[in-house]
Image (cartoon, rainbow, N blue to C red):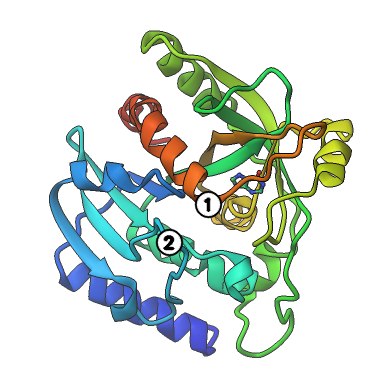
Amino acid sequence: MPSDHRMNDLQQATEIVRRRGMATPRTAIILGSGLGGLASEIEDPIAIRYAELPGFATSTASGHQGKLIGGKLDGVPVVVMAGRFHRYEGYDDAAVTFPLRLMAELGASRMIVSNAAGGLNPGYRVGDIVVLRDVIDWAKSPTRLGDDVTSAIDRVALASPISVVDEELLEAALQAARNADFTAHVGVYLATLGPTYETRAEYRMMRRFGIDVVGMSTAPEVRMARQLGMRVLALSMVSNVARPDIAVIANHEEVLAAGQAAAFKLRAIVAHVNQLPSP
Ligand code: HPA
């Protein structure tokens, strides 16, 4: 048994959460910028502030609540991160992904992760949902691999390139969109460090690389979840569209507003996928 700090933190955090009476979750859900509204729909919620959990960093981005919430969504036990950690806040990949290890320890066998992202694919519109087929990570952090505060799982998980795709969950998400009568695309997500949005030249370059959406999160969580054996569904909500030839600059307010308008789409997909039996 590794005797490093993170392992102790994981055991203590798990114990705290269990003591508060959280049931074994089927699905771990990470809510992105402006998509936190879903948290208020959880039945019999048990909310624990990140500050109460050893190993958790503190979330600072606006539009993020900073709470782990257990309960039921449509009758299915879930654990929800209302607020997540970003590398632009100064956290390394190990800190950003620590909650995943807790949620896996609690028993979640799949993860639905959402984010707000800039649309590069010219076919996308603000408010569209993109189901991610794969992720490119341009911001892998200098996690201190080999450092004795980094556990064995961090060492492997954060160093492994693993694809996102779970074909079954991806198809289920597309089906949910069709059922609810809205468009969902399938695309590739690029994770940058942030916190800046892109220059027009950067958007132009990314588009030429064939990237469909760009954002500042999700890649480390996906990598960790896959390493922990969870099935992953990753969703982007297009909060702004890149117009490399027009002088408009993305801003955080429009990202949050688009999230509110598209929340019902995320809700429909989560409802459908969450009902699928566990693997
Ligand atoms: N770029 C990077 N991250 C983002 C964007 C964007 O245009 N929109 C929302 N998150």
- Quadrant that contains the C terminus: top left
- Above-or-below relation of 3 to 244: below
Residue 87 location (% of width, % of height):
62, 67
Q: Amino acid at mark 1?
A: His
Q: Amino acid at mark 2?
A: Ser
In three-dimensional space, the C-alpha distance between marks 1 and 2, rounded to whole angstroms, equals 9 Å
Q: Which residue occupies the foreground of this view, 61 or 253?
A: 253
Residue 103, by quadrant, is bottom left
Residue 175 location (% of width, % of height):
46, 14
Residue under label 2: 62
Under tag 1, what secondary structure? Answer: helix
Within 8 Å: ligand 1 and the Cβ of disc 2?
no
Query: Pointer 1 and pointer 2: residues touching (CB < 8 Å)?
Result: yes
Task: Determine whether, in the image, residue 24 is placed left or right of residue 46.
Answer: right
- Residue at x 26%, y 48% (from the top left corner): 39
Residue 74, by quadrant, is top left
Q: Which residue occupies the foreground of this view, 120 or 44?
A: 120
Q: Is residue 153 visible?
A: no
- Above-or-below relation of 140 to 16: above
Under tag 2, what secondary structure? Answer: loop
- Residue at x 36%, y 13% (from the top left corner): 180
- Residue at x 43%, y 85% (from the top left corner): 8
Q: Residues within 10 Å of mark 2 (few under 14, many from 20)?
A: few
Q: Give me the disc on residue 118.
A: none
Q: Give me the disc on residue 252.
A: 1
Q: Which residue occupies the foreground of this view, 124 or 99?
A: 124
Residue 169 location (% of width, % of height):
50, 28
